[in-house]
Image (cartoon, coloured by chain):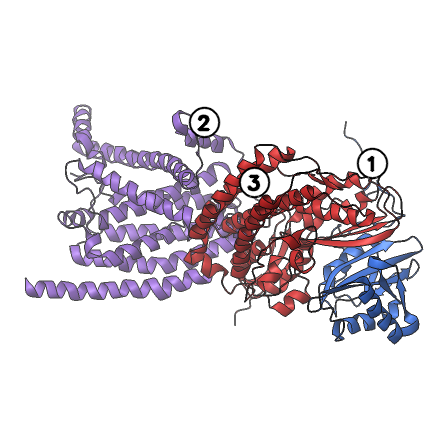
Amino acid sequence: MLKTETFTLNMGPQHPSTHGVLQVVLELDGETVVQAIPNMGYLHRGIEKLAESRTYAQFIPYTDRLDYVSSMGNNLGYCQTVEKMIGVTVPERAEYLRIIMTELNRIASHLIFMGSLAIDLGASTGMMFGFRSRERILDLFDMVCGARQTYTYIRFGGVSADIPAEFIPALERFLTDFPAMLDEYHRLLTGNEILYHRLKNTGVISAQRAVEIGLTGPALRASGVDYDIRKVEPYGIYDRFDFNVPLGQVGDCWDRYIIRMEEMKQSADIVAQALSQMPEGTIMASVPKVLKPPAGEVYHSIENPRGELGYYIVSDGGVNPYRLHVRRPSFINLQVLNETCQGLLIGDVVAILATLDSLMGEVDC
Amino acid sequence: MSNRDINTLLAKIQEQYLEDVKIVGEKAQTALLVEPQRLLDILEFLKTSESYQCNMLRNLTAVDYLEYIEVVYHLYSLSLRQAITVKTRCSMEDLQVPSATSIWPSANFQEREIYDLLGVKFTGHPDLRRILLRDEFEGHPLRKTYQAGNTGEKEVKSLC
Amino acid sequence: MQEITGLFNIAEILRGILGRFLPDPQLVDICMSLINIGAIFTIISLTAVVLVYAERKVSAFMQRRSGPNRVGPGGTLQTVADMVKLMAKEDIMPAGADRWMWMLAPILLFIPAAAVFVVFPFDNKVIFADLNIGVFYFIAMSSQSVLPFLMAGWASNNKYSLVGGMRTVAQMLSYEVPMVLSILGIVMLAGSMRMSTIVAAQQHTWFILLQPIAFVVYVITATAEINRAPFDLVEGESEIVAGPFTEYTGMRWALFFLAEYANLLAVSVIATTLFLGGWNGPWLPGWVWFFLKVGGMVFLFMWFRWTFPRLRIDQLMSFGWKVLLPLALLNIIVTGIGMYIYEFFS
């Protein structure tokens, strides 16, 4: 009788497809995964602790470094939470600018998702195409705030700068080109038989389990649970836009992929609507230079590309937050990795990691 | 869901559990303050009861108030679209709170994070280890008494 | 006499020169063999350099980038620069490695890759050894490359390498079978395993027209044999880092690389010889036709690589055994019946 035993393979922290410095300790029986335990903390910077020694405004740049491919969303979530504490009304134009920027950032983030999924499955051309289109969005952000990745564009009471004259024509050109780009990706990736068979019925997460384990964002909606904070608790001015929340049926990798592709389309639609409705006016409410929110606490969450990004801030009435906690969707979504990977192959672990789309900057905080 | 509705709902729970439950905060900050020993009962009740159906644990965190550590549960009901905040306090001498992983598996990583950064022990947690910091790390950095700068590392002598 | 240096009568000229200095005609033959071996190695290294450059440019073209464009005119010397870099690199050997096996693996891998070039007909009468079992020789030699992969995977003492090595064995062995069966159809039609006879039989009709299914099966299995995407599970960068090559550095790694491109060239040459009529073609000289066709095949393989995602191991195995193998077998049966009917009527 042959005696077989499992072996442990440390996937990461230096590994091409763990999207940063995640370590997945795989227990393998040949190619089959027995256990996949994520091990994080390699990028832990103690941002929550740092917040306690910074003023409220000083903390905005730190939020950029959480989910560093959708920094606009992080800025928005933090600023809205603090605005909720101090009770500021944001000017109309600034609200529209915020929507335009966060939705563009959602597209950019999903393009990275698409690219990294493609390269994780071995189709490097998909990644190049995704990054090429993302470049157009980064150019737009560059025009507005001079940064390509860490924007700090959204501030308390508004946004840091009004858009320059060349922004709107450039954005309109992008919106005209975008459907054609999306179509190209669908022809390159969605229509590919191999990709379909790699993703379909791989890593199925049932709707009930997805809710129990705390999945949010596209990963939850792929399982068919209708939970998009933009719809269920509209923050900012999201109630003024007409858009669909794409839902999946099975909750497999394929649904998670298709849903993000569809969300890009919806986001482009929201940007177009916001652009046509945007009024003239100021972009900044008057906010005291030294912020001292009244003692108390607020939990506020927004829909980031990776899920529900929540900020829980406790104030003691001083200039620094007494306690600041960030509910990072990537961190909580990673919990599902182990049980989803069990019984699948190494190649599937990569596909599941890619479609969960966890970002280590956010996981480790 | 308006604040008044939440308050009536919370008042109902208080009636049921009497002395173990208090309502703290006002307006949007309203929360249920629960004694640790009744915590699991109440969380279970909030999850299963018809009028709450909090099937989702959105956020779980803890705050160090020097005399005690407060663990905060942000619950959400997907079917009723309403949010409830539950809090519990444990004194610095006895940092033990029952684990909510049996009710919401999503508490797993979040409780590990709180254990790691604040040192609250969650009894009944399946795998209570440090999650962000390395295993040898000493202390819990998010405590107010934690001395930043002391990383627990031995003093590094300069080679020059 | 057929020789690889037969192009432009180089062989005759060389023979003439050597004949003046060497009294014994046998010595002349030995010298000519050595020169021919040298020529093969030159061809392999030159084509590797050209193919690496071509791959980068083709991938850049498909991904809308410019590709290498700094070293030399149009970046043509980029590969040379890379070679220099690889040679200058430190040779790191993992501590737990099985020393001799580990060192031998890249060399052993390169031998079959180079040896198959012996039977390639570059033009009419331009062939090193026109064996009467040419096709068989090619198959036998190319299947030797399984072992060095497994050696490298095992000896590296690395789990990624081991998984990669096991994958190689599974993949190459299971794709060898349909590949051989697809080539069998050609051998049946040509009635010979001699390369020059097979090419000569395609004077009027290329075998791709008579054996389209065999061609498709061959191209798919050949892609799997040389471990290129979508069958690059052996290296599968995003899964097992670099498979058996994970622990190799510098020139040792470059040998793997060289063998990979020599193999790419080899399967393209075989496709050209067996299916695309070899050197046959109007107007242009034979060797031009030959290299044009080989270039076309190489481009096809590159096209696959830069557009397809990777298969999963179970999909790969079931595709090989459940689709390609029956298809190749069916092709042989149909070919046999077809030949019988053809003979019956003519």
Residue C25 image position (x, y, % from top left): 16, 32
Residue C260 located left or right of residue A94: left
Question: Which amino acid, mark 2?
Answer: Arg
Res. C70 mark: 2
> Does residue C202 appear left or right of residue A316 in this picture?
left
Q: Which mark is residue A262?
A: none
Q: Determine which residue is flagged by label 3.
A: A137
Name the one closer to the observer, A319 or A131.
A319
Colour chain C is painted in: purple
Along the viewing direction, whichever of B75 and A5 lies nearer the viewer: B75
In the foreground, C300 or B6: B6
Q: Tell me which label, 1 or 3, sits earlier in the chain.
A: 3
In the displayed structure image, the side of residue C127 where residue B109 appears, left or right = right
The location of residue A231, given as percent across then percent down, is: 65, 58
**Chain to which mark 3 belongs:** A
Rounded to the nearest angstrom, the CA distance separating label 1 from label 3 is 32 Å
- Using the rendered image, report if marks 2 and 3 lie on a common chain: no
The colour of chain B is: blue
From the image, state whether disc 2 or disc 3 is nearer to you. Answer: 3
Using a 10 Å C-alpha cutoff, classify the residue at mark 1 as few (fewer than 14 neighbours), some (14 to 19) or many (20 or more). few
Residue A292 is situated, as x and y percent measured from the top left of the image, at: 86, 43
Residue A289 marker: 1
Callout 3 amino acid: Ile
Q: Element at badge 1?
A: loop
Find chain A in the image and tell me its colour.
red
Amino acid, disc 1: Lys
Q: Within the image, what quadrant is residue B61 found in?
A: bottom right
Q: Position of residue B134 (x, y in %)?
A: 75, 50
The image quadrant that residue A57 belongs to is top right
Say what secondary structure mark 2 lies in: loop
Residue that appears at 93% across and 59% down: B93
